[in-house]
Structure formats: C-alpha cells, structure tokens
Image (cartoon, rainbow, N blue to C red):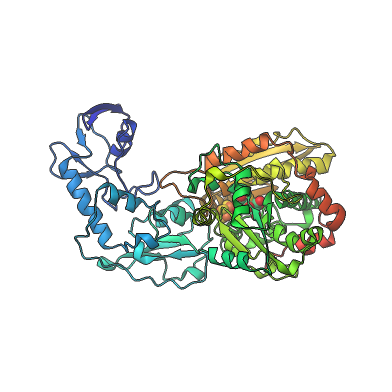
Amino acid sequence: MVNLKIDGQKISVPAGTTILEAAEKVGIKIPHLCYLKDINEIAACRVCLVEKVGMEKLVTACNTEVEEGVEILTNSPRVREVRRINVELILSDHDCKCVQCVKSGNCTLQRISNDLGIIEQPYKNIHEVNRWDFDLPIIREASKCVKCLRCVQICDKIQGLNIWDITGSGYRASVGVGNNKKITNADCALCGQCITHCPVGALRERDDIGLLRDALADPDKITMVQIAPAIRTAWAEGIDISKTEATTGKLVSALRRIGFDYIFDTTYTADLTIMEEGSEFIERFTHKEDYSWPMFTSCCPGWVRFVKTQYPDYVKNLSTAKSPQQMFGAMAKTFIAQKLGIDADKIFSVSIMPCLSKKYEHNVDQVDDAGHGKDVDLVLTTRELDRLIRADNIQPDDLKEESFDPIFGEGSGAGVIFGATGGVMEAALRSAYFLITGENPEPDSFKSVRGMKGWKEATFEIKGLQVRVAVASGLGNTRRLMEAIKKGEVQYDFVEIMACPGGCVGGGGQPVHDGCEYASPRGEILYGLDKFSGLRFSHENTAVQMTYDEFLEKPNSHRAHELLHTDLEN
Ligand code: HC0
Ligand code: SF4
C-alpha cells in the first residue's frame, strides 16, 4: 500500500492508483474534462492539474500514480489559477453559445467553467467553422469540439471502428472523420457511443422534434407512438422525477399530454419478433445443411451496418425477421389500423428509441412493406423525448398512472428484457423451448446469458438437442467474436449481437451522465420488470396470439414474410 496525504487527509491506497482515484476514495472530486477511466487517460484538457507539495510543476491527477509520502493539494491558489487559465484557453477555442446548445445544463465544460466562476472571456475566441451537411442522424459541431479525444478513443477501443481521428496538425489540429473519408462512407455503425461520451455538445443526434410537432398539429394525421423496451428504464433521467416515481404508467401519461392519439408498446412486436425469429431458428436448426451457421439476430441496426461493412460474408447468416420497431410499423398500418377502424394512410407512426441507428433503420427502403408510405414515419431518441417533456412544461408531479391503449400495449417480460444484452436470446430460448417441446420451461432457465460481460456463451439442452449460443454487446467485443467464428475457434448455433455495450439500455440515444455508465442498473430494472410480470413468455402474449389468429395465420406464413421479414442482403 502507498501512504500519502490529499488536502490534509491521510490515505492508504494500492500502488498503481492514480491521484484522481485516490482523491475520490476520500470524497475529494478533482474536476476533469477529457478523462474516461481505462479509455481516455491522456490528460489532454489539463483541468485535473494538482500540486505535489515541494514540486515546482503541477501534475495531472488522471494519469499520475500516487507515491509514498507525498502531499497533494487539489485546490490550492496555484492549482486554482492554472486550472482557471486552462479552462479559459479551452473556452477560447469553443463556440460558447450555451443557450442554443442541446447540451446546456448537462455539459461538463459548462459546469467546470461555472464552478470556477468564469464569467469573462479574457482570450480572443476563435473556433472552427462548422462544415457538416450530411443527412445522417449524427451531427458534429466542430465549433464546439474541445479536442478531448473521447470520441476517437471510444470508437477505437470500445467499438473497434476507428471512425474518428485527429486531423490537421499544429494549431489546425482537430478531430474529424479519419482516413480522409466523409462520415457517409466511413463505415460508421451509427451506434451513437461517441455522442454519449462527448462531454460537450460537439456530437449530437439530429433533432426531429419539429417533424413530430407538425404531425401533432395536422388534423388529418392520426399519431401513433410505440416505446422501446429500454425507454421505460431511462426516460426519467433527463427530467426532474425520481427513479422510483418514474413508472411506465407515468411515461404513458406524459405521452398522452404531448398529444399522441394512440400509445403502444414495442414490447408487443418484440414478442412477435420472438415468434418469427424463434420459428426461423427452429427451421434453420432442423435443416442445418441448407443454411450458413450460426444464425445471428438482426434487430440492432448498428450491428447490421457493422456486419455489412466488416463481415459481408456473414450477412446471409442474419435472421430475416425485421426488428420490433419495424414490425410495429408494418402492423400499425395494416392489422392495427384494421382493428382500430382507422385509415392507414392517415397514421403517422412514431417510435421512441434509446438508439441513434434506429433513425437510420426506419429510412431504409426495404423495410416499408405495409403500402402506406413509411412503415415508421419518425424516430425520436430518449433524449428528444425528455426535451419534449420539458418543452411542453409537463410537470412530473402531475403525471398519473395510465395504461397503454388497449390490445397493442400488451408485452411480456420476455419482450421487456430485449433492452438488455442477452435479453433477445433469453426471450427466444423461452419460446423456442415451448415450440420444440410443447411445454413452458421454468422462465429463468436461460438466465446464464444475462450480465454485462461483453461476450458470453452457453449451451442448453432442449429435448436432447444441444443449442450453443453466444451473446455479444459492443462492437469491439463483436469483432473479437466474429474473428473467432471466422477462424473456426468457436462454434455456435444462435448469436445475439447488440452494438452498444450492455445492449439498448446503454444505447446512443439514452440520457447522458458524463463519465458514468448506466447500462447495468438500467438493465437490472428491466429484469425486475420481467420477474414481476404476470406474463413471462412471448408466445403467451394475447395480442400476439390474436395477431396470428386473425391476420398472419402462423409464424413465418406467407403474409408474415411479406410484412415482417426483409432481405438484408440488399
Ligand atoms: Fe432495442 Fe429492440 S431491444 S433494438 O435495443 O429487438 O433501440 O429497447 O426497441 O426494434 O424491442 C432499441 C431497445 C428496441 C427493436 C426491441 C429489438
Ligand atoms: Fe441501437 Fe440498441 Fe443497437 Fe445500440 S444496441 S445501436 S441502441 S439497437
């Protein structure tokens, strides 16, 4: 152990601990901007400078290890002065129009600057000009970039895609798309992890709230919204309501106040996906010689984009089942319209997702099969939902417990856990077991695929059949898994991939808590909802059963194929 003093407090920590971590152990928070534990420890921002008593030069706390007997001052007059100058210099290179910035109120630079009491700008403000004119859901505001390199490191170390890089040199050095590429041809998966790790407003989602406002104001449109499984666990993080108060019922109430005509749950089509994908798996599994192995899930568009550019030979291994978002869109403008007795041409179908790449997915041509324009007209992220709730002055205390609109708001616990890594696999196995044996398994039989480990594997026996499964989340983990499959080092039958670490709960459209990962606690909430749900199996969802009885006939029927499957090879 190493003994030292921080701001007068004696402390003993293991060798190798950084000053920043040691200080946190005794409740001292050293401000920092660029630091991300184990990912970005390059001390680029120099905000975490501290004084080592007796040393002339200040040291950066994020990447300097503790030493025996030293005394550290984290807030001495010298430290305060230099830290302040460093932040003022960062601000001189930053477009400080906070009132027009989507990150205002949740911006690390703004908070540090306010905490230091910076109200003047002593250095001339010259920032980069924005030149971003791509029609993609990701937007980069160069004028706000603080060159912390978090986006570069997240994309490189966690997502293994290396989209961002340092561009230019000297005083022109900046961050941009690497290899002289444009974002449109850089193989970006649109997972949005760079956005959720940007400490300022330099990376953000395209804001589509205006399109929703137009639809809500149009008397000829019937607005129908679906909410993704992972929304219910995170929607309250961006508004003033406690976690325990933030129920799904109150979210439904907020959506009614916003003005949606019909409020449904993507979990209904998550259950439908299980019926389609589970049946497809059984068909492939029992005719192995006709297919390429393993079968991969296809509901994460970040993963689909990744496999198309990085492992094109495996595109044929993707399940042909559409994602629950797109299945909902297809059902909204066919069966749901029919059941509600409304004109499908008038439906404006909106989905609220924890995801950036869903904003891309709904625009892919081959997903529009209902024959009434786009199956899903608009996708908003959780962050946009929170902005909408705030903009509409909806007071969380006024929200009451309300129910989804009848029939298509029904979802099973199996559908709810789709939002966490391993959830799609677990839900699929629960129903595959039933489809193979005619009996329900104990609902938690497949829980060994839960948890935040980036690459999990398990083998289950169903009626004498060995089913080898793997689950990966995060594209860096996915690349490792794909390489092992390619080299023949591992053999699986069914593989679930989610582009974002932890699955959709950690999605690129979720609320941001700078430097903290929330995927794990959000996932726990989904597992709790499943545990206490009266309905644990997708095949027992009565809305799904009615959909087959009255409309689709049976899983993988001709009509189901027309509406709920797609050819991802194109
Ligand atoms: Fe997901 Fe989904 S689980 S991808 O993360 O399959 O976005 O929550 O909505 O579509 O259901 C996201 C979350 C979904 C879809 C579902 C799947
Ligand atoms: Fe979107 Fe979920 Fe995939 Fe992330 S893991 S890209 S949130 S679908």
- The quarter of the rendered structure image containing the C terminus is bottom right
User: Is residue 162 among the parts visible in the rendering?
Assistant: yes
Say left or right for 35 vs 244. left
Residue 551 placement (x, y as % from top left)? 84, 58
State left or right for residue 505 relative to residue 545: left
Residue lying at 57% horizontally and 41% vertically, measured from the top left:
523
Residue 392 or residue 293, whichever sits in front: 392
Looking at the image, residue 562 lies above or below residue 287? below
Which residue sits at x=33%, y=35%? 24
Q: Position of residue 465 (x, y in %)?
A: 78, 40
Residue 498, horizontal then vertical, whole percent: 59, 51
Q: Nearer the viewer, residue 75 or 434?
A: 75
Residue at point 33%, 59% (across, down): 147
Q: Position of residue 459 (x, y in %)?
A: 69, 38
- Quadrant holding the N terminus: top left
Q: Nearer the viewer, residue 321 or 31?
A: 31
- Give the mark count: 0
Is 514 placed left or right of 365 in the picture?
Answer: left
Q: Is residue 469 left or right of residue 338?
A: left
* Identity of the residue drawn at 68% across and 50% down: 265
Q: Is residue 468 visible?
A: no
